Amino acid sequence: MKILLTTCSYQDTPGPHHELMESQGWEITRERGPLTEERMLELAGDFDAFLCGDDAITRAVIEKSLPRLKVISKYGIGLDKIDVPATKEFEIPVLFTPGVNHMTVAEHTFGLLIGLTKHIVTTAAAARNGEWLRLTGHEIYGKTMGIIGLGRIGKEVAVRARAFDMKVIAFDPYWDGEFAAKHDITRCATMDEVLTQSDVVSLHCNLTDETRSMINTDKIAEMKDGVVILNCARGEIVETADMVTALNSGKLGGYGTDVLDVEPPPADHPLLSAKNCIVTPHIGSRTYESVPRQAMKSLNNLINALSGEGDCNCANGVV
């Protein structure tokens, strides 16, 4: 049994997943993802399974992987880099790991928020370089946190926002009324309602055709001056050029993101030099606690799928 392992977090972080994988007797090829379609096409065709991160698993990759490929096990929950319709057509199960990283990502979201509102990154870097740069920041107490996507991660962000005595409003088409009532979260009828009322907008929705580039010049114009936007979802949800323009003009008070539209980015990616912007290298779920949880779930999914026994958290309905 030959397995292609591409996720770097899985490979780099200690935990019981390493011993369990070695115990399976598989032949494992390790690559440093996320891999491009070109690299995946070079590798495809020689593996029974992919244990992947955000690699480009396109229709062409899937077709070249047949007939040997039996299953794709995703380390994580986002499936936007996988051609899911093609996997269903060719009856390749796609597995994923819901419910393992929501607390970690929510903490990272607040790290970005505090970093921006208190100028922590800028002033700490200046102090390290010998400059005593005493910038004036903002409190988040009493401000309105608007959450777009009140799923597992969005809910954990809401709980933390309430702990900071922020008002929380949210939009999600699948509304959990019991959770909202318990945590005093106001339901908005539309995303635009969130955008117009919030001091902080936190994005926690999946990347789909409907959400791609949904934060753009027109939507930013609806927002308050000085609003902070946080993105621990997908970089493509934001129109990069429009975000850069709004930051540099001062319309936005800040943008904190753990994701970009190109990862890893080129050295001249415009958000890396934009005003009041913090970019972290897609590490929101990369902690010593979260990685083993995700790794074990993705590995157990794979083991169960290959053996035909037990739950394997199939995301595309192919079992």
Image (spheres, rainbow, N blue to C red):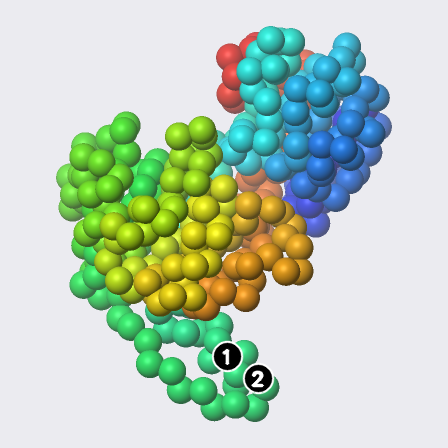
Q: Residue 196: image x %, image y %? A: 21, 50
| Residue toward you, 76 or 273 | 273
Kindly identify the amino acid type of the residue bearing the numbered disc 2.
Arg
| Residue under the point 66% across and 32% down | 56
| Residue under the point 33% across and 76% down | 137
Residue picked out by circle 1: 124
Q: Secondary structure at mark 2?
A: helix
Kindly identify the amino acid type of the residue bearing the numbered disc 1.
Ala
Q: Is residue 286 above or below residue 85?
A: below
Image quadrant in which the N terminus is located: top right
Q: Is residue 183 above or below residue 51?
A: below
Q: CA distance from mark 1 to mark 2?
A: 6 Å
Quadrant for residue 114, please give it: bottom left
Q: Are marks 1 and 2 in contact (CB under 8 Å)?
A: yes
Q: Secondary structure at mark 1?
A: helix
- Residue 105 makes an appearance in the image: no
Q: Which mark is residue 291?
A: none
Quadrant for residue 194, please give it: top left
Q: Is 246 positioned to the left or the right of 278 in the image?
A: left
Residue picked out by circle 2: 128
Q: Is 274 positioned to the left or the right of 64 in the image?
A: left
Q: What crowding class fits label 2: few (fewer than 14 Cα within 10 Å), some (14-19), or many (20 or more)? A: few
| Residue toward you, 89 or 6 | 89
Q: Is 165 positioned to the left or the right of 239 in the image?
A: left
Q: Residue 197: image x %, image y %? A: 19, 51
| Residue under the point 16% across and 43% down | 186
Q: Residue 155: image x %, image y %? A: 31, 42
Q: How many marks?
A: 2
- Residue 307 makes an appearance in the image: yes
Image quadrant in which the C terminus is located: top right
Q: What crowding class fits label 1: few (fewer than 14 Cα within 10 Å), some (14-19), or many (20 or more)? A: some
| Residue under the point 43% across and 52% down | 242
